[in-house]
Amino acid sequence: MSDFTGGLLSRRAHFVVVAAVGQVGGLLFAVVAATAVGSSGVPAPVDLAWGALSGVGTGVGMLFLFRGLSHGAMSVVVPISAVCGIALPVLIGVAALGERPSTLSWLGIVISVPALWLVADTGTRAGPALPAAALDGLIAGIGIAVQYISLAQAGSGAGLWPVAAGRVAAILTIVPLLSTVGRAHMRRSLHTVPAAAVTGAAAALALIAYLRATREQLAVVAVVLSALYPVVPVVLGVTVLRERLIPKQSVGLLAAASAVALLATS
């Protein structure tokens, strides 16, 4: 929901401002949450470093995701970024980290990839902006993959502090780009600051939930479940906004539900 809302805000304000303010809101939330939960001791530097690398991925991912969405290319950017955000962590988890999902998990992973693509396909076309939108989606997906796989490497003794370290790194990644935002764009973006901050706090909450999930199960399973986020806006659009599903999305929703069931029970 935070990525979807951030994309909508990026149509009313400059995407760099939305991304930067969102990470500040996420940092405040993460620090409060990490303080409240505590840790088994002083977080190890290596755990904070993994969190920081995850934050760099977040910063890059959100910048290109919001840039693509700000151009109205949701039907191209979202499926490419989501599928990339699944495929790369799964490949790294299996090939480099030695994770071995069960047969049911593999079936859920295989089903989730086309499910995501179908759910995110609105049936519209990006027109002349297709190549640029595809590139935005690809880079966003790589950033999201770095976010997922890096955060999963942080040890449990660090508590939630790797998420806070990630927000600091994300801010340092994004803030230098604020100099490219003209004064007029900056003024027009000020009214979105509260909503962008809340959106960033929601994203931090999602990463906290993901981090805790990786400590209970294989990271590749947690990644796939987390990457099914495009299903949520589609379901809300149908139930709240009374939007109509196209046939592809209906098939995608059924496939996504099957993937979740397989991954949750394996």
Image (tube, rainbow, N blue to C red):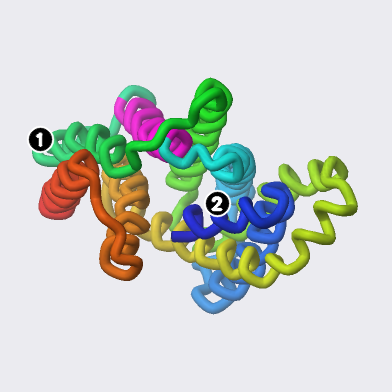
Q: Quadrant of residue 81?
A: top left
The percent position of residue 25, horizontal first and vertical second, equals: 65, 66
Start and end of the magenta stretch?
76-94
Q: Taken as a whole, is the magenta stretch helix, strand or loop? A: helix
> Going by the image, does 205 lie left or right of 21?
left
The percent position of residue 100, horizontal first and vertical second, equals: 22, 33
The structure residue drawn at horizontal position 50% and vertical position 26%, both measured from the top left corner, is: 127
From the image, which quarter does the N terminus lie in?
A: bottom left
Query: Is residue 193 shown above or below 150?
Result: below
> Going by the image, does 94 lie left or right of 47?
left
- The residue carrying pointer 1 sits among few (fewer than 14), some (14 to 19) or many (20 or more) residues within 10 Å by Cα, namely few
Whether residue 67 is in magenta: the answer is: no
User: Is 61 in front, or is 210?
Assistant: 61
Q: Tag on residue 155?
A: none
Residue at disc 1, secondary structure:
helix
User: Is 109 in front, or is 98?
Assistant: 109
Dot 2 or dot 1, earlier in sequence: 2
Q: CA distance from mark 2 to mark 1?
A: 36 Å
| Residue at the disc numbered 1 | 103
**How many callouts does the rendering have?**
2
| Residue at the disc numbered 2 | 7
Kind of residue indicated by mark 1: Thr
The percent position of residue 257, horizontal first and vertical second, equals: 16, 51
The structure residue drawn at horizontal position 61% and vertical position 63%, both measured from the top left corner, is: 26
Residue at disc 2, secondary structure:
helix
Whether residue 93 is in magenta: the answer is: yes
- The residue carrying pointer 2 sits among few (fewer than 14), some (14 to 19) or many (20 or more) residues within 10 Å by Cα, namely many
**Residue 56 seen in the figure:** no
Q: Quadrant of residue 235?
A: bottom left
User: Is 247 in front, or is 41?
Assistant: 247
Q: Nearer the viewer, mark 2 or mark 1?
A: 2
Kind of residue indicated by mark 2: Gly
